[in-house]
Image (tube, helix red, strand yellow):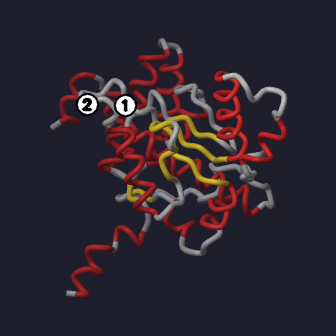
Amino acid sequence: MVAIEGRRRNVWKGDWSISCLDLHMMSCGAACAMVHSWLLSLHNSVFQGIQLPKFVKYESLLSMNFLLFSFNWIKKIKLLITVSLFYCSILTGWGKHSKVMGDGTLKKAVEALLHGMGSPFRIYENNLGRLVSTGEVLAAWLTQPSVFNLLVLYDVLNHSQPAAPSHDHPALQN
Amino acid sequence: MLLDTLRVFDNQVYGVTNGLLMGYRERVWLRAEILFDELMRMDSSTSSAFYNALTDMLWHFGQVKSPAIRNVPVLLLLIF
């Protein structure tokens, strides 16, 4: 709830949308809690029939941009379009402030969390600080019966009424 | 020990943190919101540093992912 409150008050100022979760500036605990919260929102979106970003073959992208293929920077823009339109992404940063370059604790913690859940997120080959999954594969994973229980967080000690799991995780729109 | 130090330093923050960690969310949430309101008046890096520290503490000591994960040691004991 504290992480959700922080997001509601825009403390971290990172992207939070159906296609992207930006975890820059967060501690490991905040980032992990946020991953749970974001995936629960996506879970609600999927069950409300909202489509996650769909993957389109690269050839069709080329035909969309056929006038622009000869420049290097255009290729970079195309890559960015591919990532932002056709993948669900989690940005951790690649750990450039770590003692060992690319070995960030946040990146490792989020990667371990997602791997432990059996989620389909994988490191994107063109950006080590980005974990991606296609919308279709992610939606299929989210609709598995056991996944919802993996995503909901519980207090170890609890003397309060449990908050409704979906109450703080409104569905994300396209 | 960390919480005791915090108590000396700032009783309001201690009260909220201790309440959240001990599972008295309903009881302390109003006080937590007052604290969060005060934080919004500070600069953004102080505010995000506070949320980072608090969520880190709650993540490591206060929350579990799911009953399934919490019961893993029990399941392992049953298996072996």
The residue singled out by tag 1 in the image is A95
Instruction: Indicate whether A123 appears above or below A117.
Output: above
Q: Quadrant of the C terminus of chain B?
A: bottom left
The residue singled out by tag 2 in the image is A100
**Residue B49 placed where, x, y %?**
39, 24
Report crowding for label 2: few under 14, some 14 to 19, many 20 or more residues within 10 A (C-alpha).
few
Most foreground residue, A5 or A149: A149
Whether pointer 2 and pointer 1 mark residues with C-beta atoms closer than 8 Å, the reply is yes
Instruction: Indicate whether A92 appears above or below A55.
Output: above
Q: Mark 1 belongs to which subunit?
A: A
Query: Which residue is at 57% across, 25% downward?
Result: A13
Report crowding for label 1: few under 14, some 14 to 19, many 20 or more residues within 10 A (C-alpha).
some
Q: Name the residue furthest front.
A: A70
Is A26 left, or right, of A69 in this rendering?
left
Is A67 left, or right, of A85 in this rendering?
right
Picture quadrant of residue B64: bottom left
Local secondary structure at mark 1? loop
Q: Quadrant of the N terminus of chain B?
A: top left
Measured in 3D between alpha carbons, the distance from the residue under mark 2 to the one under mark 1, in whole angstroms, is 8 Å
